[in-house]
Image: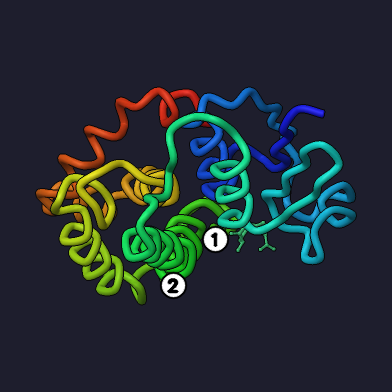
């Protein structure tokens, strides 16, 4: 069976693994399941997305999926060969997947999208609490992309994890302002936004 990536295309983690598949030139099917749907509950212990299926092999956790796709299919390697460079790539993926995602997507963007009063106005209390951390994180990322890519001077799997998070972060006012003032990150974001894998996975 062809590669199947299961999970709503809105998810930054689904998008990361789709970007990996597209960078490799792999033909795949994206099955757009929401987290906690009956299907996801049957495929993932916490009902999370993404989940991957390939030739009867079933996998969850976006980094595991991304590394499987990178290892199994032809196409450019998205993790460098040397142990040190590979470890650095995994380091930045893990940082994006945990610290950056938690702050920018979960504690900032999702508040804008889902924490609203009965008139549809955003309740800003939780947003205000994280704004300092959001600004600092953009500065950390600005430094991390200063060699042109995320923790590297070459495109890697780490970029597939970071770009969807920046995409969501810059959709809201403080994230947009933080990106504007982060010189390296702005150049990086504009450059990588041109990649076909990014354009074709925009939900
Ligand atoms: N560590 C997981 C995180 C996946 C994750 O948090 N996915 C979100 C969508 S972006 C989700 O399913 N959220 C629902 C939940 O956490 O219950 C991975 O990297 O795959």
* Residue located beneath label 2 in the image: 126
- Say if mark 2 contacts mark 1, CB within 8 Å: yes
Vertical relation: 149 (above or below) 84: above
The answer to whether the beta carbon of the residue marked 2 is less than 8 Å from any atom of ligand 1 is no
Q: Quadrant of residue 142?
A: bottom left
Q: Residues within 10 Å of mark 1 (few under 14, many from 20)?
A: some
Left or right of residue 178: residue 27: right
Q: Secondary structure at mark 2?
A: helix
Ligand 1 location (quadrant): bottom right
Which residue appears at 80% of the width and 58% of the height?
44
Distance between the alpha carbons at the discs numbered 2 and 1: 9 Å
Q: Position of residue 176 (x, y in %)?
A: 25, 47
From the Cβ of disc 1, is ligand 1 less than 8 Å away?
no
- Left-right relation of 38 to 17: right
Q: Using the image as rendered, state which of residue 184 and residue 68 is in the foreground.
A: 68
User: Upstream in the sequence, badge 2 or badge 1?
Assistant: 1
Crowd class of label 2 (few under 14; some 14 to 19; many from 20; radius 10 Å): few
Please name the residue that numbered disc 1 is placed on.
115
């Amino acid at each position: 069976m062809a590669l199947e990536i299961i999970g709503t295309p809105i998810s930054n983690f689904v998008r990361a693994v789709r970007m990996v598949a597209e960078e490799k030139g792999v033909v795949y099917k994206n099955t757009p399941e929401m987290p906690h749907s009956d299907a996801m509950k049957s495929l993932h212990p916490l009902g999370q997305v993404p989940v991957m299926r390939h030739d009867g092999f079933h996998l969850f956790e976006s980094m595991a999926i991304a590394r499987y796709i990178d290892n199994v299919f032809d196409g450019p390697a998205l993790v460098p060969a040397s142990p040190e460079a590979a470890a650095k790539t995994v380091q930045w993926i893990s940082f994006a997947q945990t610290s950056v995602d938690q702050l920018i997507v979960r504690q900032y963007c999702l508040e804008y999208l889902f924490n609203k009063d009965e008139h549809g106005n955003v309740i800003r209390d939780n947003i205000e609490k994280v704004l300092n951390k959001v600004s600092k994180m953009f500065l950390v990322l600005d430094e991390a992309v200063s060699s042109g890519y995320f923790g590297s001077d070459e495109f890697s799997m780490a970029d597939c994890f970071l770009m969807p998070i920046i995409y969501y972060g810059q959709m809201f006012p403080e994230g947009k302002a933080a990106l504007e003032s982060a010189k390296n990150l702005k150049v990086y974001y504009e450059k990588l936004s041109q990649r076909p894998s990014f354009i074709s996975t925009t939900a």
